[in-house]
Image: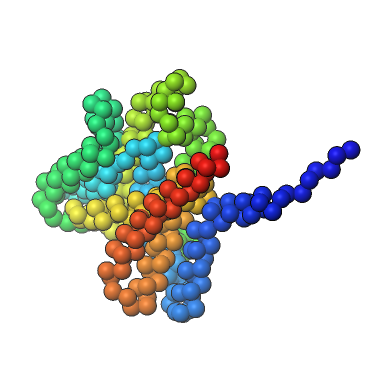
Amino acid sequence: MTETSAPSTVQRRQAWIDRGERYGLLVAWLAVIIVFGILRPTTFLSWMNFSTIFGSQAVLVVLTLGLIIPLTAGDYDLSIAGNLTLSAMTIAVLNVTMGWPLLAAIAAALVVGIAIGALNAFLVLYFRINSLIVTLGMGTFLHGITLWISGSNTISGVDFAIAQWVIVNRIFGIPLAFYYALILAAIIWYVLTYTAAGQRLLFVGRGREVARLSGIRVDQVRAVTFICSGILGAVAGVLSVGTLGATDPNSGLTYLLPAFAAAFLGATSITPGRFNPIGSVIAVYFLVTGITGLSILGISTFVQDLFYGGALVIAVVLSQLVRGRQERVA
């Protein structure tokens, strides 16, 4: 009877490296909380502070989730921030200026998001243009439409019901917006992990030509990712209106860099080397916790740009290193 040999030193070391990659960002987040908790225990560790952190960043979480879907297929959607702003402004204009019921205005905003995603898919796939160029131009175009329909003005006075169901009503002191974002993250995680559609998407992201030769309709999969990104951009716009109670024609653009930073940083954890919703959620709150802690310490507001910009560069480098190491192991 043969005995199973114990794991070798190399195998044990590899297992620790894998765990470090998988949970490193989560450990780093906990470390940031501990450090700022020691430095400012009364202010930073208060439940009100964490409630604000979790509730106020739901828009960024949803936007990041929208980004990772086309990114998984190897495409970019730089128009998603413009989509957010236009969708939010659609609600404000229809509800406040034109007197539409709130639900009808929200439905119109979601249709706008779907239309933007479909148009991105058409331009990229029919004309075979790089998604980076198409969506960059589309984002600028959408910003122009937003300025036009709003007269370059902030529109306030949106039906208070949207604020009630986004930021006012709470569970355990945390706004409902946070739970909406978590539900969306869970749905995307389930689809990517346990469904045939999710596996096809991952296959397309690994190699489009191989996927095509395997019988996968690559263009159809890519088109769906753009439409999903468009829908989530519009959902982020709905949450933005509910959070602020108004719509600024320029505010949504500030989300683009943080969303990309969180998407790439999230790809270094939980499922290293792959864009994944759980890693993205952790990345958002890791970045925001750090910025909040520095703000409480009295550091100037410019630290936000430094934090997000630096995080994006570091995250891209780390994701490339992880991917390269996985290819060598394979």
How many labels sit on residues? 0
Question: Can residue 197 be seen here?
Answer: no
Q: Quadrant of residue 44?
A: bottom left
Q: Position of residue 211 (x, y in %)?
A: 44, 26
Give me the residue at 32% from left, 40% from top: 76
Q: Position of residue 270 (x, y in %)?
A: 53, 50
Position of residue 146 measured from the top left corner of the image (x, y, whole percent): 17, 46
Determine the residue positioned at 26% across, 25% down.
Answer: 126
Task: In this rendered view, identify the residue nearer to me: 306 or 178.
Answer: 306
User: Which residue lies at the image location 19% right of the left edge and 41% below the top edge?
Assistant: 137
Q: Determine if residue 124 is in view.
A: yes
Residue that protrudes farthest toward the right in the picture: 1
As rendered, which of 137 and 4 lies closer to the eye?
Answer: 4
Residue at 47% x, 31% y is: 203
Picture coordinates of residue 195, whole percent (x, y): 52, 32
Q: Is residue 327 left or right of residue 157?
A: right
Query: In this view of the protein, which residue sits in the foreground, 110 or 293?
Result: 293
Q: Quadrant of the N terminus?
A: top right
Above or below, 311 against 183 in this view is below
Colouring convention used in this rendered image of the protein: rainbow
Q: Quadrant of the C terminus?
A: top right
| Relative height, residue 126 to residue 193 (above, below) | above
